[in-house]
Image (tube, rainbow, N blue to C red):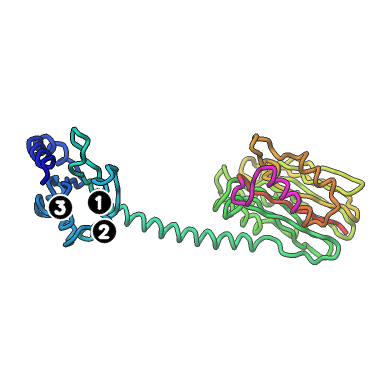
């Protein structure tokens, strides 16, 4: 040993009773190594676990090795005076090892102390959690595909043109829309915004699609029936659905519509008209016994466009915390001379640029828009 190491060892032995009172009470393993890789101290926890005292042995023999570890962190600490950490396996047990330098009064490194904390159970729990997380992700992806499959496909009716954009802020969205044929003359169209996001919200969208009576020609009556069906399900009071529902007679070009709490007003516009479709109505919920929905009626003309959207587009905010808002949205819509899909894409582009958003997973809320053109 060097003279400094001898002095340190003697000093260490003299103060040992005090050190043992502190360190031997620790659950973690603690050992001290001199600069020649010799073990000069081991605490009680380490000695008891290994079944023998290895003071005087080379540090790597504890690990069942005949030569120093290639990633020896105690040598690193002795060289650069910094703390280092690694993971080590000892007798099939996993440890997190932290090595720190010990300096004398002249600021010379004369030893290193290693603290070994067992992480075997923690690692096992981590792997189990990862497995569960991967399973949940797979199930979530399956649910996402299921929800996406419920969205409307291409509409081939020559009497209309229909396009939509659907962007959930999570894997599973709380917005939903559908358009469907009721009979040879009538089509139904709705846009809904359900409470929350994720799995509970997606459950409500599936409930909505399956429970709405698609043969009923009165939107108000269909929403009333949906309300009572919702209440039969005994769902939590925090869960609810807001929905605007319209039924259009493509022969007479008359549209009946009703609203169950959707906060944004759809609009009908063309080069010669602009009408917001405002109607009161309680969300589909269990908040009251008599929801009392009403029908509105509007005569449509060839070239009229029905624009539906959720509040996610309006509530997008820029770096100054300003909302995108109705005015910016209407500026694009009312200067529209584009095909429906391109118009929706232009709105999306403008809103994303305003909010500094580059993809749907950066959104704070779902964004859904739909445009129906009467031919």
Name the chief secondary structure element in magenta: helix
Viewer-nearest of labels 2 and 1? 2
- Spatial distance from mark 2 to mark 3, Cα to Cα? 25 Å
Question: In the visual, does 81 lie left or right of 31?
Answer: right
Q: Helix, strand, or loop for circle 2?
A: loop
Q: Which residue is mark 1?
A: 118
Q: Position of residue 324 (x, y in %)?
A: 71, 40
Where is 85 relative to 124, above or below? Answer: above
Question: In the visual, does 182 lie left or right of 124?
Answer: right
The 10 Å Cα crowd at callout 3, few under 14, some 14 to 19, many 20 or more, is few
Q: Position of residue 145 (x, y in %)?
A: 59, 62
The answer to whether residue 103 is seen in the rendering is yes
- Spatial distance from mark 2 to mark 1, Cα to Cα? 21 Å
Q: Which residue is mark 3?
A: 49
- Spatial distance from mark 3 to mark 1, Cα to Cα? 11 Å
Is residue 354 located in the magenta-colored stretch of the structure?
Answer: yes
Of residue 217 and residue 310, the one placed in the foreground of this image is 310
Q: Residue placed farthest to the top in the image? A: 105
Point out the stretch of residues depicted in magenta: 345-363
Question: In the visual, does 301 lie left or right of 206?
Answer: right
């Amino acid at each position: 040993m060097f003279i400094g190491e001898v002095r340190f060892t003697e000093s260490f032995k003299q103060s040992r009773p005090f050190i043992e009172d502190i360190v031997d009470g620790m659950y973690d393993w603690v050992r001290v190594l001199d600069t020649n890789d010799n073990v000069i101290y081991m605490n009680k926890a380490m000695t008891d676990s290994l079944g023998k005292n290895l003071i005087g042995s080379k540090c790597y023999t504890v690990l069942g090795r005949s030569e120093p570890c290639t990633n020896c962190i105690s040598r690193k600490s002795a060289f650069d005076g910094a703390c280092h950490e690694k993971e080590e396996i000892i007798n099939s047990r996993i440890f997190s090892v932290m090595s720190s330098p010990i300096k004398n009064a002249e600021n010379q490194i004369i030893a290193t102390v290693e603290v070994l904390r067992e992480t075997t159970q923690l690692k096992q729990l981590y792997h189990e959690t990862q497995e569960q997380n991967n399973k949940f992700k797979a199930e979530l992806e399956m649910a996402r595909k299921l929800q996406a499959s419920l969205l409307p496909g291409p509409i081939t009716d020559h009497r209309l043109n229909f396009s939509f954009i659907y962007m959930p802020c999570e894997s599973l969205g709380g917005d939903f829309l559908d358009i469907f044929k009721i009979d040879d003359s009538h089509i139904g169209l709705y846009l809904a915004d359900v409470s929350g996001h994720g799995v509970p919200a997606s459950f409500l969208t599936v409930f909505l699609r399956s429970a709405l009576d698609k043969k009923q020609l009165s939107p108000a009556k269909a929403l009333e029936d949906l309300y009572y069906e919702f209440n039969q399900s005994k769902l939590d009071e925090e869960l609810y659905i807001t929905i605007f529902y319209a039924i259009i007679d493509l022969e007479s070009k008359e549209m009946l519509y009703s609203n169950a709490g959707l906060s944004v007003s759809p609009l009908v516009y063309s080069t010669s008209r602009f009408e917001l479709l405002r109607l009161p109505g309680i969300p589909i919920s269990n908040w009251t016994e008599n929801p009392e929905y009403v029908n509105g009626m509007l005569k449509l003309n060839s070239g009229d466009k029905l624009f539906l959207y959720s509040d996610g587009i309006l509530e997008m905010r820029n770096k100054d915390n300003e909302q995108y808002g109705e005015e910016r949205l209407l500026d694009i819509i009312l200067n529209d001379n584009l095909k429906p899909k391109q118009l929706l894409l232009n709105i999306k582009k403008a809103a994303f640029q305003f909010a500094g958003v580059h993809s749907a997973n950066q959104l704070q809320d779902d964004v859904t828009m739909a445009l129906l053109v009467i031919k």
